[in-house]
Amino acid sequence: MKTFIIAAVTIDGFIGRDAKQPSSQWTSQADKRWFGQRTKAARFCVMGRKTYETFNRPLAGRILLVQTKKPIEWQKKQAPIGTFVTVIDDTTNLMQLITASPTQVWASKLPIAQLYQRLDEAKIEELAICGGSSIYAQWMQANLVDELVLTLEPIVFGQGVKLFNQSLTSKLRFIEEKKLNEAGTRLVRLGVLRN
Ligand SMILES: NC(=O)c1ccc[n+]([C@@H]2O[C@H](COP(=O)([O-])OP(=O)(O)OC[C@H]3O[C@@H](n4cnc5c(N)ncnc54)[C@H](OP(=O)(O)O)[C@@H]3O)[C@@H](O)[C@H]2O)c1
């Protein structure tokens, strides 16, 4: 399974002003288009519970795996707003579940290494790691990220939520850079040199 971090980042390295701010409030149209296109191609997206709650709805054509320490409680909270959440544990038959619908929300408290193994065994080809800060950092720390796909937005926040919320030592190699619009939004792809 190929894994990649997908994030929109300010020039000074932030992914949000605070944990509740939806990225759509400050990212460019070009980034929104890119995010939709790239995550639909991957089909499988993992994200933290706080990031999911910044938009709080399923995304068409994608399976969103939400990491939370309390998946059963969270499943109950989502039900009244009409979102059906499947809790993923050791016993879930993922291959069968994947075929049920192209648009789904899953929740899990499985440790990251175990989650990766389960998804890999279910023959998932690509996994988009969609943040936030704590999720990006933990997947990097676990040495389970192949690539960083960053949209650099020409904006500064001065302070806010950093791309990673813990100290990391990973080394990267440049793959490509692309201009996304005339305002200066750039897409940068970097490979992670695995330890
Ligand atoms: N610009 C971008 O591209 C982008 C992308 C994504 C997010 N963001 C921004 O990032 C901010 C949110 O990031 P964040 O770091 O504060 O929160 P987050 O990573 O989205 O979510 C944190 C939550 O995820 C759950 N979690 C984390 N690690 C876990 C683990 N190992 N096992 C099980 N559950 C785990 C916990 O949920 P429970 O508390 O329920 O246990 C934790 O409170 C927002 O501002 C958002 O807009 C920006």
Image (tube, grey):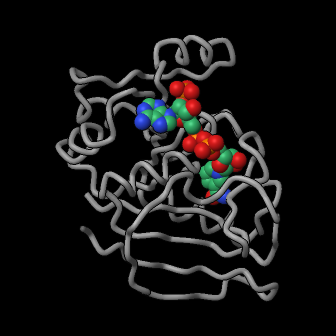
Can you say whether 17 is above or below 38 in the image? above
Q: How many labels does the image show?
A: 0
Q: Estimate the x, y position of residue 92 in percent, counting from the top left.
A: 25, 23
Q: Estimate the x, y position of residue 174 in percent, counting from the top left.
A: 43, 86
Q: Quadrant of ligand 1?
A: top right
Q: Which residue is drawn at 27% across and 45% down?
A: 116
Quadrant for the C terminus in the image: bottom left
Report the front residue among 104 and 128: 128
Quadrant for the N terminus in the image: bottom left
Can you say whether 6 is above or below 149 in the image? above
Q: In this view, does 36 lie to the left or right of 128?
A: right
Report the front residue among 138 and 132: 138
Which corner quadrant of the image does residue 80 belong to? top right
Q: Which residue is drawn at 76% across and 64% down?
A: 27
Q: In this view, does 134 lie to the left or right of 169?
A: right
Q: Which residue is drawn at 76% across and 68% down?
A: 29
Q: Is residue 29 left or right of residue 76?
A: right
Can you say whether 179 is above or below 24 in the image? below
Residue located farthest toward the left when viewing the structure as drawn: 121
Can you say whether 53 is above or below 62 in the image? above
Q: Estimate the x, y position of residue 48 in percent, counting from the top left.
A: 53, 39
Q: Estimate the x, y position of residue 26 in percent, counting from the top left.
A: 81, 60
Report the front residue among 84 and 119: 119
Q: Is residue 6 left or right of residue 181?
A: left
The answer, for residue 66, to whether it is visible in the render is no
The answer, for residue 12, to whether it is visible in the render is yes
Q: Residue at x 68, y 58 (%)?
A: 15
